[in-house]
Amino acid sequence: MGQREKYGGKALVAGASEGIGATSTPGYINSRPAKTSLFSPAVLSPEQVAVECFRRLGKQPSFITGRGNRIASFFMHRIIPLKTAVNIMGDTTRKMYGIDNQILG
């Protein structure tokens, strides 16, 4: 039985989310982000994301790609308070792109 028949002719869609990390798309690469720390989740290749999507297609509707991203997401959503998580993400983004806090006011 093919995938189409298995799911009653319905379209299969998988939504992949990096959650905390990034995918090395041309836009991401052209933005020239700096590596912020040794513990930052690895930047995933589009191929890695696609392989994981196809592997999970029909099994779950959405997921976070990459082990490091899943671990970071777990801490950011379940362990660390929301305000702290938002501050961490903001600080990390500013470091990645060399944005001075004074500019943001």
Image: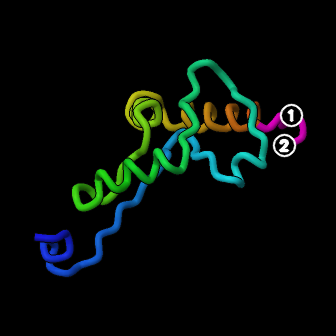
**Residue drawn at the location 22% of the way across and 56% of the way down:** 59
Q: Quadrant of the C terminus?
A: top right
> What's the distance in space between the residues labelled 1 and 2, CA to CA?
7 Å
User: Which residue is painted at 54% across and 40% down in the image?
Assistant: 44
Asked which secondary structure carries label 2, the reply is helix
| Position of residue 21 measured from the top left corner of the image (x, y, whole percent) | 55, 39
User: Residue visible at 46% across and 36% down?
Assistant: 69
Report the side of 71 relative to 86 (left or right): left
Q: Quadrant of the N terminus?
A: bottom left
Label 1: how many residues lie within 10 Å, few (<14), some (14-19) or many (20+)?
few
Q: Write the start and end of the magenta stretch as one range.
A: 97-104
Disc 1 element: loop
Return the residue at label 2: 104
Q: Are marks 1 and 2 in contact (CB under 8 Å)?
A: yes
- Colour convention: rainbow
Q: Which residue is mark 1?
A: 100
Image side of residue 94 versus residue 87, left or right: right
* Between 92 and 18, the one nearer to me in the picture: 18
The three-letter amino acid code for the residue at tag 1 is Asp
Q: Main secondary structure of the magenta part?
A: helix
The residue under the point 41% across, 45% down is: 64
**Residue 18's spot in the image, x, y percent?**
49, 46
Badge 2 crowding class, 10 Å Cα cut-off, few under 14, some 14 to 19, many 20 or more, is: few
